[in-house]
Amino acid sequence: MVEKTKSKTKLKESPKEFILEFFKDSKIKDEGGVLTISEAPKDFEEFIGKKSPYNLVFDFDLHTKVKDSELIMKGSYFLLAIRDYLSNRGQTSLLKINTKVTPAELSKKLKLGNGKNFEIKTSSGFLYEFSFLSIYQYLNDKNQSISRILIKDKAVLDLDINKLKTQKGNKEDISVLDPLEQYQVAKKILDKKVTSEIRPIKIILKKKLEKELFRVKDHYFKQIKEKDEEVEACMNKIKMLQSKLRHTSYERDVRILERTIRESKERLESLKKKGYKERLKTEEDFHINDEVEKHVLSIKNTLINITFFYYPIYEVIVSNKARKYDPVLDKTF
Amino acid sequence: MKSKKNTVLEKSTENPSEKVFYDQNLKIVETIAKEDFNIIEKIKEKHFEPREVLELKLKSEEEAKQSEITELISYPLIKKNLTFNLPHQQEGALRILRDLDGRALLADEVGLGKTITAGMVLKECIVRGFVRKALILTPPSLVNQWKEELSSKFELNFKEVNKESEWENTEFAIASIDRVKNFNNQTNEFKHTKAHEIYWDIIIIDEAHKLKDKKTFRWKFVDRLQKKRLLLLTATPFQNDLIELYNLLSLLRRGHLGTISEFRSNFLINGNERQPLNPRELKRKLSEVMVRRRRDEAKGIHYMKRIPRIQSVDLSWDEKDAYEEVVNLLFVHYFDFNGVPISTSLAMHSILPKITSSSRSSIEFLENLIANPKYHINTIDRAKKILEAFKSLVKDSKLEKLIELVSEINQRDKGTKILLYTKHPATLRYISETLKKQNFKITEFMGGLTPDEKTKRIKEFKEKTQIMISTETGSEGLNLQFCSNIINYDLPWNPMAVEQRIGRLDRIGQKKDIFVYSLATKGTMEEHVVDLIINKMCCIGLIMGELPIILFNLGLDSKDSSGSSKFEEKLMHAFLDSKNNLHKFASEIGKVESEISKGIKEYEQTKQYTSQLLDN
């Protein structure tokens, strides 16, 4: 597969190892479960608004005992602060891929045969690695994933870049860069990956939403039904009273029946006048919308780094014919 | 900007977070997030950083990743601001978020800190990035208290919304529910209809039992709010009728208890509105949306008694005369420069408390009046005479009583800490000077102190001095559990303000019963007001937080445009109507007392019904 969701970074390293790496240029004292960091980078101190030393603990009980300690656990405030501090850093990198190919290896790759004289020239090959952070937020949950996508000549490259030896690149070695179109390709690959990643989340959300929507719809269905029944009962009552009235001659009963019919008619009018169906339907739509909004899956894809890799492509000229070898792709052409 | 094949134009859009690219026919070719675009630009400018930073950054994303809610990651942030760690508060917040999807009725008994639990839910949602728009609706009298607690304990700044235009661009809004629920009959719309146009990530409603009637504008206003999460806070979700509970839950989850007809047939016994037909099933249904804990279940909370001690002050004849003269000046001879009478009501509100506070503050008032040319010459002349009378007083009976009282307290418990309250800075200075002369060690605490200075003075009171004299201003939110004696040198006519004073001491962590001493001058209206507020309201065994609910239920907690509470207003009107006739005033106070006592009785009954349904 093309996109790499895991880098050579050991993702399961403990927060403590991460902290040690982050503060590797600072003074660190590890005593009694408390990691005391002093002489932290000045810009980090400014960023979090607190000067070192920092007393970092990795256990909640210890945190309650050590005064002014920062609890370090997955998702804790201090780690969030480091993440935010790093968010605008490390966005672009330049690496040179070390691919030393001997003339003998070249001859073998290009099947030139032994003993032939040939001239070797080099030109530049390059590729881009785009790293994206995707955050999926829904209800009170949050998931995230990192995608590292290699693009060469606007096409995805299925290659484990970490297997190649690299060194810090020199920007004088490279000419004008315009990664926009490469980025657009990478973005399409990312979209496909995201679509597959959110599938299980969507299933969970759909199930939950269906349950909530059933509650709301059922409630309003019954409410409308109850009102309908009330209207019907009212109409039946009027009919029944009118029939009784036709067969009654006692003046007192006539008066009572007429009054009851009048009251029932008023009730019926008031039920119809308020437009209960429309009102309840509007209410239902509001609550359905509320539930739908509540179960929305919000996706945020952010580009966090572009690394530009460059390396030599070998060109061999034999008998006025030029052949090329790309050592990264291990291809001849 | 140009790509290799097509000419693509970059154009700014209304959305600052994205860049839009058009082709020559102005058809959108690509929309790119601005953050992404900036990185692309960096590459073009050949601006590179070490690759190790990326690796570190990826690790940081992994370490900062928050998975499902099993603990409150925001707790370490707020822990430092909370005086006590009460496990039930964290447990409640976790349950609301994890099990109830943030839609819940928080019905803990009074005194367990529902505000803190709700604040924890709010903070957690903000830290986790779930909440960007939050709204809190409270009774009018609690708006400031909420704002203060959210700021000091949760470091969250909420903006109070009073006018409709203020809803726009307010991410964290707090409002008095009484104010925003107003309905305009002419336009047939709510005055604050803009609140309904916003999609709120969370809404918290305090004292939610007031939403018991679905025919009220209050209920309808809340029902129309679009919200992802909703917390309803009340210790007494129903008062007289189970239908009230149904209405409350309808706001939370429509149809959770069925239609009203289903609810009636499933849960109501004909003729008995309080006893459910099927209590076990109703309780089960409630547990799906409710968090409720009793005080006896919560660890770490002990309640101490409040012991009221009214200290009657006998004024000398001269003092009484001087006092009567000032009241007379205000009632009869208070004119502006043109001889037009100045509103007695206004004058009484602002001046009377100063007069009853101390002779020093009376003198200050009279001196200011005399120096101010806006008053009529006759008023000024009269004031001059009264000022002379005050200055020639040889005795200050109230202050003498105070010294006597402090000595008595010392005899009972030598060196015990005393918090002494007065409303007026002039009185504060006057008492401080006098007590210092008597060799008492004093800390003064008033408005205008910086946070550092406040901390310093609290430390001084805790460690070095015996008495702290304080005004209300600046003392909100103080934790003085180490002190168990309070003296009200003068008393605000607003019981909520008195509760706030006592609340500095009556907090979780208080280990002793609290003595509430209040000085009351005999033969003045103060005597009756102190008796009502202290003996009949603040020291009758209610838990901290219950009196505001009772006043809210009685509609006596809201404020008028001048900032006075309705209760205060009631007392002031009683005084004005009595025209300084104390018998008449006492009779009016008696009526207020009856009203309060009825409110307390109803509240106690409600508590009992709620407990029967929810706790047994």
Image (cartoon, helix red, strand yellow):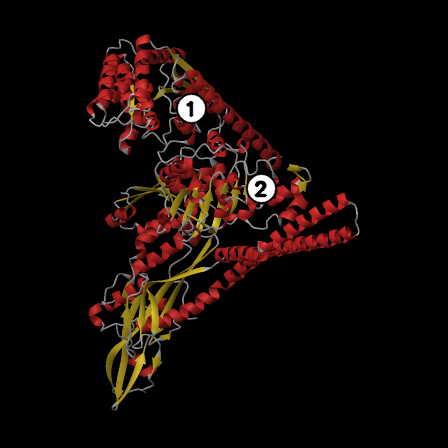
Rendered location of residue B313, percent (x, y): 37, 12
| Tag 1: amino acid | Ala
- Secondary structure of the residue carrying tag 2 is helix
Q: Chain of mark 2?
A: B
C-alpha gap between disc 1 and disc 2: 37 Å
Q: Is residue B72 visible?
A: no
Report which quarter residue B507 is drawn in.
Answer: top left
Q: Residues within 10 Å of mark 1 (few under 14, many from 20)?
A: many
Nearer to us of marks 1 and 2 is 1
Q: Is residue B193 visible?
A: yes
Q: Nearer the viewer, residue B475 or B272?
A: B272
Rendered location of residue A278, percent (x, y): 56, 58
Q: Earlier in the sequence, mark 1 or mark 2?
A: 2
Rendered location of residue B478, percent (x, y): 36, 30
Which quadrant of the figure contains the C terminus of chain B? top right
Q: At 38% from the left edge and 71% from the top edge, which residue is drawn? A: A159
- What label does residue B245 carry, if any? 2
Q: Is residue B242 left or right of residue B309?
A: right
- Residue at the disc numbered 1: B574
Q: Residues within 10 Å of mark 2 (few under 14, many from 20)?
A: many
| Tag 2: amino acid | Leu
Q: At 30% from the left edge and 9% from the top edge, which residue is drawn? A: B318
- Secondary structure of the residue carrying tag 1 is helix
Quick check: do tags 1 and 2 share a chain?
yes
Image height check: is A152 above or below A78?
Answer: below
